Amino acid sequence: MNKTKSMTVCLNVQDNVAVALTNLAHGDVIGPGGMISNANVPAGHKIAICEIKAHNPVRKYGQIIGFASKDIQPGDHVHSHNLEMGDFIRDYSFGAGARFTEVIPREGRATFNGIVRRDGRVATRNYIGVLSTVNCSASVARFIAESFSSDRLAEFPNVDGVVSLGHGTGCAMVPDGEGFVLLQRTLAGYARHPNFPGILLVGLGCEVNHMDCLVENMHLKQGPFLRAIEIQKAGGTQETVRQGVASVREMLAEANHVERHHVPASRLVLALECGGSDAYSGISANPALGVAVDLLVKNGGTAILSETPEIYGAEHLLIRRAVNRDVGEKLVQYIRWWEEHTSSLGGEINNNPTPGNKAGGLTTILEKSLGAAAKGGTTNLMEVYGYAEPVSAKGLVFMDTPGYDAVSVTGMVAGGANVICFTTGRGSVCGFKPVPTLKLASNTEMYRRLSDDMDVNCGLIVDGQSTVQEMGEAIFRLILETASGKQTRSELLGFGDDEFVPWQIGPVM
């Protein structure tokens, strides 16, 4: 980053806007050449550093983030009033930027203290899950989980808890339709997640997503650690809760017999998410997380980038890093699907950013996407997955998900993520059991204001007290500590029971 002065930062020599690092007042001298601010510019917002003629590109990160809707003078505030979206050709150049990434030999890789299951899968947490097949059974699933108070769990010190995961769908949907398939795939991903040594499936008995159908379609094998119960067959709420509590208690006794062992960082699958973004997200938290991702990949691990609508406009940068053309074409197909999907519903994929994003200085989806894509680091894009598909490739991969945080993370956890890093500029508060979530704040002011919710202050980069590289290395170390059992802020606050939100597509009938 080329700092013109402490009040602003220019991110690339090709840029024609800079980012305000503090609130600028009309008349402030902000550049070494004596450029004067022509308006009050909030911190995080853009200010023109040269003349930009109407209809010409506005550049940030060295990339086009939109077009001037009218003439812009040096020192002008650049935002929704004079910056708009526009069509332009993005150079996909499949795989042109792919390069060899040296992976550290096994004996030299970083390690963490993980839980190794009997089948060889590696867990970072140890929960029993009570998973509803349909919204009609969500309350009963919750009643079962709530029966295990902290006092009742005291005799199982190696178990992190009993969590119920309810959701708003499972019936009144098209059988075998796209939404139905996604729901079953998501439920199966959670049922098989290594952080759950035991799962109790709870159904009503007459739903479209019927228990027998789910078990058969997803090839789930019922047994001592995957049990199923239906309210209508069991005899109602109270009897279902009684039987469910008995089943969970049996699983708890076995789940308590675990120990943590040193395992290589190659067994980590890291979910990458950003929510409540601001203009600093793409300057501090996201690129710092990208450094941590590069370190994880070099140690043989996996990182999942997601949120297809929020890499729109930056997808060409990922496609250029695709390990082969087939991988790049998969991402293009998902971009095209989103364009058609949003259009068919009377919207546009570039209706993003949200009001909060805009208040934080992000004007267009292109600008937001360029900052968001920085989470993925710099290594090759190894594979592209559909929503909630099991992730098996090593290195950086992409999963097609909506931009809605809870839906996106739910898909990545179903795909096998065992640690989550969540960057935020406005201050998102959430967690996603059974997987620990680290919150990375993009700016110091928000970090201090929401200190109970944030794990890392990446605002130190903006403050000049840390570099992106230093912060990324610190994040990587914290990922290892978290995977080893260190609790995150969201875990200490008790988040994670209500953020299970499978992607719901199709008619509700």
Image (cartoon, rainbow, N blue to C red):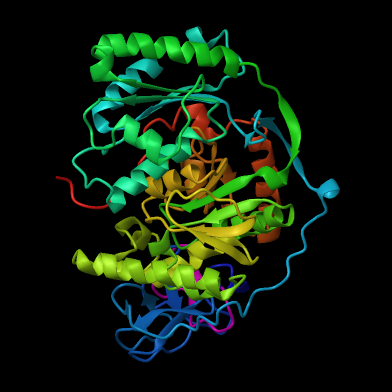
For image coordinates 57% across by 7% down, the residue present is: 155
12 inside magenta stretch = yes
Q: Is residue 137 left or right of residue 268?
A: left
Picture layout, residue 327 above or below residue 144:
below
For image coordinates 68% across by 56% down, the residue present is: 297
Q: Nearer the viewer, residue 479 or 472?
A: 479
Where residue 464 appears, as percent x and y from the top left, is: 64, 60
483 inside magenta stretch = no
Where residue 47 appears, as percent x and y from the top left, is: 44, 75
Visible residue check, residue 502: no
Q: Nearer the viewer, residue 35 or 193?
A: 193
Where residue 429 appears, as percent x and y from the top left, is: 42, 40
Q: Is residue 343 left or right of residue 32?
A: left
Q: Nearer the viewer, residue 284 or 319?
A: 319
Visible residue check, residue 236: yes
Circle count: 0
Picture layout, residue 47 above or below residue 254:
below
Toward the right, the furthest residue is 107
What residue span does the magenta drawing correspond to? 11-28
Where residue 189 appears, as percent x and y from the top left, is: 47, 40
Picture layout, residue 300 above or below residue 95:
above
Q: Could you tell me what secondary structure mostly forms the magenta stretch?
A: loop
Q: Is residue 102 left or right of residue 305?
A: right
Q: Nearer the viewer, residue 417 or 189?
A: 189
